[in-house]
Amino acid sequence: VRAAISVPGTGTVQIEDVTPAPVGPHDVLVRVDASGVCHTDLSAALGRSAGYERPKVLGHEGAGTVLEIGDRVRRCEVGDRVIASFVPACGDCWFCSRGWTNHCERTAERVSAYSVTRPDGSLAQTMAGLGTFAEVMTVHEDALVPVRTDLPSEQLALIGCGVTTGVGAVLWTAGVEPGASVAVYGVGGVGHFVLQGARIAGAAEIIVVDPLEHKRAHATSLGATHAIDPADGDPVQAIAELTGGRGADYVFEVVGKAEVAEQAYASARRRGTVVLIGKPAAGTVLNLPGDVLFRHEKRLVGSLYGSARIREHFPTLVLLAEQGILDIGAAISRRFALEDANDALAAIEDGTVIRSVLC
Ligand SMILES: NC(=O)c1ccc[n+]([C@@H]2O[C@H](COP(=O)([O-])OP(=O)(O)OC[C@H]3O[C@@H](n4cnc5c(N)ncnc54)[C@H](O)[C@@H]3O)[C@@H](O)[C@H]2O)c1
Ligand SMILES: [Zn+2]
Ligand SMILES: [Zn+2]
């Protein structure tokens, strides 16, 4: 089957005819019906993430149909529609049993266990134990959530990362309440869903910051009340002016740059909450003012996968989309064939898309 394998350090992939990993007792063979293309895929292709010095099948945001199951699989059946999760949830480790399945202790073992065989006979691991930039993938059953819905596969695919990360950061990491003021730095594929999450939570003010005019316009059309171009002056100041001089109740960083995380920290009011979603390059260190840290009593939290419990929250997000409360389709700017995965990666770099989908 065809798969897109990263060429380390180049930001590109090459399409190869590979053999998926054999289906073990707890594994599932999935036909990938659609895969979103996330900034994390680009960072991996550029070699900015640990472990990506070697070629891997990229893609961690996908949905598909079960083709075959191992003897001991109990979470899904042949023919089920499934959403893949880039963090598996075993259900019974220390973290899973406390409801923090996005920190499942079996993650490292599960995500490194799967490799495809390349035409030259060598092996290439799959990103996050998935590798959704492929026609077919072998994955552990713990990384799949079956869903019964008529939503299009491209929308289900986005639940695999962008939707859950963005909406979840608002609802399940931060717990934004109705009437709150929310600021979002970066309204790309994930930030777009932070914005939608803020709207769903009933935020009264949603301020977005993004250097790209079309992203700001898109955000405004989906409920942002104010849009700031950081080129027009200090966005921290602009957010302060819009919030009575105090700063926003909740601030989300969805870019992955240290300087933006520092601006996000400065943009929250005293006792406000700052949520870091963006993934900085490995080794990045933040500079935060120590005297402000204690005096302003801000809460600074990271958010991995929207703090979601996939088996409960993927179906919740499907329901919100079916009811029209969450508009996943609005984020999909372009569709590419798997062969054109490099164009999709380039489109992230150029900032020309909110999200694109391989299908
Ligand atoms: N925490 C998680 O679980 C998780 C999951 C998925 C992605 N991520 C990370 O989230 C980040 C965003 O991913 P994405 O797919 O939305 O990327 P994206 O490229 O689609 O969006 C990034 C946005 O940030 C904007 N931007 C750039 N510089 C800015 C600045 N100085 N101020 C404000 N906005 C700025 C860009 O114009 C773009 O719209 C990445 O770092 C990605 O790796 C984290
Ligand atoms: Zn992602
Ligand atoms: Zn676990």
Image (tube, grey):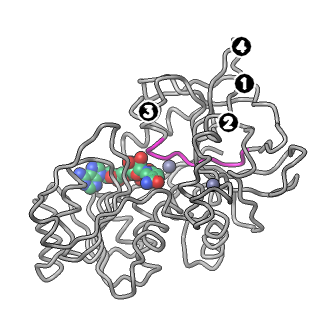
Residue at left 36%, top 52%? 278
Quarter placement of the N terminus = top right
Q: Is residue 36 above or below residue 9?
A: below
Q: N-terminal of the two: label 4 or label 1?
A: 1
| Contact flag, marks 4 and 3 (Cβ < 8 Å) | no
Q: Quarter-wise, where is residue 93 in the image? A: bottom right
Nearer the N terminus, badge 4 or badge 3? Answer: 3
Mark 2: is the Cβ under 8 angstroms from ligand 2? Answer: no
Picture disc at residue 121: 4
Give the alpha-carbon distance from disc 3 to disc 2, as whole Å. 22 Å
Helix, strand or loop at label 4? It is: loop
Q: Which residue is mark 2?
A: 134
Quadrant of the image occupied by residue 251:
bottom left
Separation of residues labelled 4 and 1 (CA atoms): 9 Å
Would you place residue 14 above or below residue 121 in this image? below
Residue 18 is marked as 1
Position of 101 with respect to 184 (left or right) is: right
Q: Position of residue 21 (x, y in %)?
A: 76, 31
Q: Residues within 10 Å of mark 1 (few under 14, many from 20)?
A: many
Badge number at residue 70: none
Q: Residue at horizontal 34%, vertical 88%?
A: 179
Q: Is residue 354 visible?
A: no
Report the front residue among 221 and 40.
40
Tag 3 near tag 2, CB within 8 Å = no
State the predominant SS element of the stretch in magenta.
strand
Q: Position of residue 115 (x, y in %)?
A: 68, 29
Mark 1 and mark 3: span between their CA atoms?
24 Å
Type of amino acid under label 2: Ala
Q: Quadrant of the C terminus?
A: top right
Q: Secondary structure at mark 1?
A: loop
Badge 2 crowding class, 10 Å Cα cut-off, few under 14, some 14 to 19, many 20 or more, is many
Query: In the rendered structure, which segment of residues is drawn in magenta?
Result: 32-40
